[in-house]
Image (tube, rainbow, N blue to C red):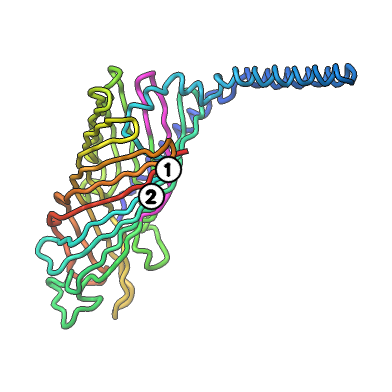
Amino acid sequence: MRNQLARVILGAFFGVASAVAQEPATSTGLLELGASTAVNELSSGLSGGGSSHFEDSLALRYSDRSRRQDDSRYSLPQLFRQHHGEFMDRYERYDPALELRGRLMPNQRVSDEPGGFDMFGYDIDIEGAMVITTEAYVKFGLYHYGRHYNTSTPFGSRNNNPPAFNSESSLGDDTLTAAGARVGLGWFLAPNLLMELETNPGIFSDLEDSPNHKDFDFPSSALFSYRPVDNFFFKFGVRYSQVFEDAPWLPYLGFSWEIVEGLRLDILAPEYLEVSVWPSASTSFAFGAEVSGAQYHVRSTSSTGKQEADVQVQEVIAYLGMTHRFSDNLSLRARGGVVLAGEYELTTGAANFDPAEGALDQGFYADVTVGIDW
């Protein structure tokens, strides 16, 4: 099921992360401040008591607090922000740390297959970052993408010659799950050149039985973002995923361009294209297109025993959307549009089952996302 070369990304990521981690990650100023404070407090304690000692201690604590506030400018996150804050704020679209999303694709059909299906998606995506040097950070997170297919009775029965519609002659309802972890590294190779490595190991399965090695996959990517001028970011790299069954390895190519303040264009082939307008700091409107999908391992129990196979799902959608930020910590995004194209290959996994495969018909698409930041 899986391209074994994807595991190379894991080794490359941890090798680079180990090299970056060798850079110093502490502030000598803070260490010196702590040592100085300890010596001063010990001297005050030995010099005597009374109100004079109390006033001296209070003054020392006040002075110490002020110095710590001043030296907070030299903490790793603050130094990283001083060097790269503007770059990080502008190089990609708004992306909340935690996303809770519901998706809907109703009344969908696959080529000449009889019947059809409704797809209900429910996603959880969480990602955070930690600065490890003034030039680098690590990313970590979790994801869970669920797809529930509610099918009509005859869906998937073409060429299976059913005496009656049952689990061996049609597809029936099913739920596909992609769940795993995110691990990434961002490293500024130069002030205007950011390298991002990411791997997302996880299970891609119908979860009908205990998982085995065929259920696991490692969607991974290496992306470089170069800023030749303040408002333009050229992007290139490579990625591995099963969105395109016959082309798991594909190049990344695109750019992000803040055309004027409040208007930006983001393109990253082969994943998405979006134009967004921010008439205010809290509200944006967007239109664009994106490609999504994956390959899942499924199982079937029939009269001949348990059998396994792979299914492929892919959608290309175009949408109009709106995002509103109620505060720095809470946002809501709603999108509606159409399924432009896509490719499906669905099976129960049973031997000799003829898959429901072909292009998706055009149809309605919608999603709603609650975003949370901290």
Tell me how far mark 1 sits from mark 2, CA to CA. Answer: 9 Å
Q: In this view, does 369 lie above or below 105?
A: above
Query: Which kind of residue does numbered mark 1 sit on?
Result: Ile
The quarter of the displayed image where residue 323 is located: top left
Query: Type of residue at label 2?
Result: Leu
Please name the predominant secondary structure of the magenta segment in the image: strand
Kindly identify the residue that appears in the image at 44 percent across and 19 percent down. 83
Residue 14 showing in the rendered view: no
Any part of residue 229 in sight: yes
> Quick one: 326 or 26, which is closer to the camera?
326
In magenta, the rendered stretch is 178-196
Residue 62 image point, x, y percent: 70, 20
Position above or below: 284 against 350: above
Q: Does the magenta stretch include residue 56?
A: no
> Mark 2 and mark 1 in contact (Cβ < 8 Å)?
yes
The tag on residue 372 is 1
Q: Is mark 1 on a helix, strand or loop?
A: strand
Judge left or right: residue 365 versus residue 14.
left
Give the residue at x 79% y 20%: 57
Q: Which of marks 1 and 2 is nearer the N terminus?
A: 2
Q: How crowded is mark 2: few (under 14 residues within 10 Å), some or many (20 or more)?
A: some
Residue tagged by mark 2?
100
Judge left or right: residue 55 versus residue 367.
Answer: right
